[in-house]
Image: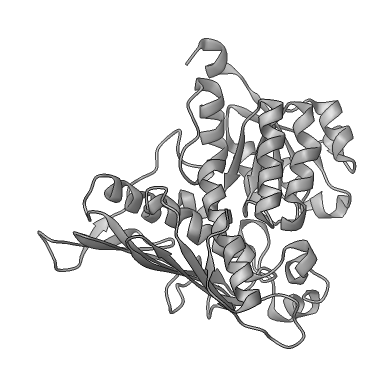
């Protein structure tokens, strides 16, 4: 790393607060000695107020027009947290400013939008990453390391179940919202609007199939079959089950808004996370847990293995993006749009399958 790269303070702007994870990502920026929050923007200033107060952001760095924010503050990196249905638009809007972009999950509302995003960033010559918070959970990082080392042989099955009590039950930093208030907001929130990209499938399937693709070594499935609940009065699903057929067998990905408890507080049943089966062993890797559980041909009795301790520069998305920009290192893993696009192919195929109630070939 050059002296200039190692000492550079990266200018970061947070644009659009639709997704509550903006607060989490700006906290990572605030805590990073090589980054500075130079601007925040949202059409509704009230949505930014908690973040403004928490991180002491001065008025001259607060905007209700994101274009004015970029033109005035000249950031190196823009964090985008719009509703899923607007990911494609926002990347196309900000890319011409020559900024690097961190998009909070999911990748996009559709494969067409994902391809628009990729094309816009290719034209700008800058870097885009997609942040999947599960990619920073030590058990899942440990699982990938063991897979890469060949500990369980070739991956033949990935089983995924994940979600929470619902997107309206918490805000940034997992601060809890009461059930009554969450129910009141349901009819108004973009999370429950089909046109905005709402629903548990679009919220959580991307997590599972993107990390599942990572575990499968980048391999894509051949066919996809998906089913969603169809609750009266709701435009979107709160529960989905997707089965993917690979050349090595079947994998299952299940999403749920309405788990009995939130996994970051108390693991519900079924547990949230992954179970991976290989030709020489198995791994269970559950969100937030301090161990993974391993079986191997040499040691078939299930035994606990402490999770890896994440170390710099791979502890969070902002730190990793800054590292890649500083060193020229290629972005890898679940943040890489190339790998994420395979996940988006699966998501789009699942949406089609659920709508037409049939198994479909993976969309190209």
Q: Residue at x 31, y 46 (%)?
A: 145
Q: Nearer the viewer, residue 312 or 118?
A: 118
Measured along the vertical axis of the image, is residue 307 above or below residue 244? Answer: above
Residue 39 visible in the displayed image: no
Residue furthest toward the left? 298
Q: Residue at x 45, y 54 (%)?
A: 220
Q: Residue at x 38, y 49 (%)?
A: 141
Image location of residue 161, percent across then percent down = 46, 70
Image location of residue 8, percent across then percent down = 60, 19
Residue furthest toward the bottom? 232
The image quarter containing residue 166 is bottom right
Q: Nearer the viewer, residue 104 or 222?
A: 222
Image location of residue 90, percent across then percent down = 78, 44
The image quarter containing residue 58 is top right
Image location of residue 224, percent across then percent down = 50, 67
Residue 360 visible in the displayed image: yes
Measured along the vertical axis of the image, is residue 155 above or below residue 300? Answer: above
Specify how the rendered protein is coloured: one colour
Question: In this rendering, would 81 be left or right of 303?
Answer: right
């Amino acid at each position: 790393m050059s002296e200039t790269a190692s000492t550079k303070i990266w200018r970061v702007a947070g644009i659009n607060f639709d997704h509550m994870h903006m607060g989490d990502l700006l906290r990572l920026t605030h805590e990073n000695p090589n980054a500075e929050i130079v601007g925040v923007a949202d059409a509704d200033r009230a949505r930014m107020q908690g973040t403004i107060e928490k991180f002491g952001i001065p008025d001259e760095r607060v905007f209700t027009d994101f274009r004015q924010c970029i033109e005035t503050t000249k950031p190196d990196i823009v964090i985008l947290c719009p509703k899923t249905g607007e990911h494609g638009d926002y990347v196309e809007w900000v890319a011409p400013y020559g900024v690097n972009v961190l998009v909070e999950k999911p990748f996009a509302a559709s494969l067409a939008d994902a391809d628009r995003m990729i094309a816009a960033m290719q034209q700008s010559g800058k870097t885009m990453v997609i942040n999947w918070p599960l990619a920073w959970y030590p058990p899942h990082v440990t699982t990938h390391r063991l897979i890469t080392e060949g500990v369980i042989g070739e991956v033949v099955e990935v089983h995924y179940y994940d979600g929470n009590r619902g997107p309206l039950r918490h805000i940034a930093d997992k601060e809890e919202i009461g059930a009554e208030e969450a129910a009141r907001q349901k009819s108004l929130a973009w999370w429950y609007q089909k046109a905005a990209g709402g629903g548990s499938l679009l919220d959580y399937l991307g997590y599972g199939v993107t990390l599942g693709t990572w575990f499968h070594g980048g391999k894509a499935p051949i066919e996809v079959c998906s089913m969603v609940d169809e609750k009266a009065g709701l435009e979107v699903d709160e529960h989905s089950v997707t089965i993917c057929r690979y050349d090595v067998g079947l994998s299952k990905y299940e999403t749920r808004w309405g788990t009995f408890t939130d996994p970051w507080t108390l693991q519900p049943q079924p547990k949230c996370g992954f179970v991976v089966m290989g030709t020489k062993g198995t791994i269970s890797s559950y969100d937030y847990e301090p161990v993974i559980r391993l079986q191997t041909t040499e040691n078939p009795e299930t035994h606990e293995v402490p999770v890896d301790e994440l170390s710099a520069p791979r502890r969070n998305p902002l730190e990793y993006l800054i590292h890649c920009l500083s060193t020229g290192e290629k972005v890898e893993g679940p943040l890489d749009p190339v790998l994420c696009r395979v996940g988006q192919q699966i998501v789009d195929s699942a949406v089609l399958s659920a709508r037409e109630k049939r198994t479909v070939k993976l969309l190209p």
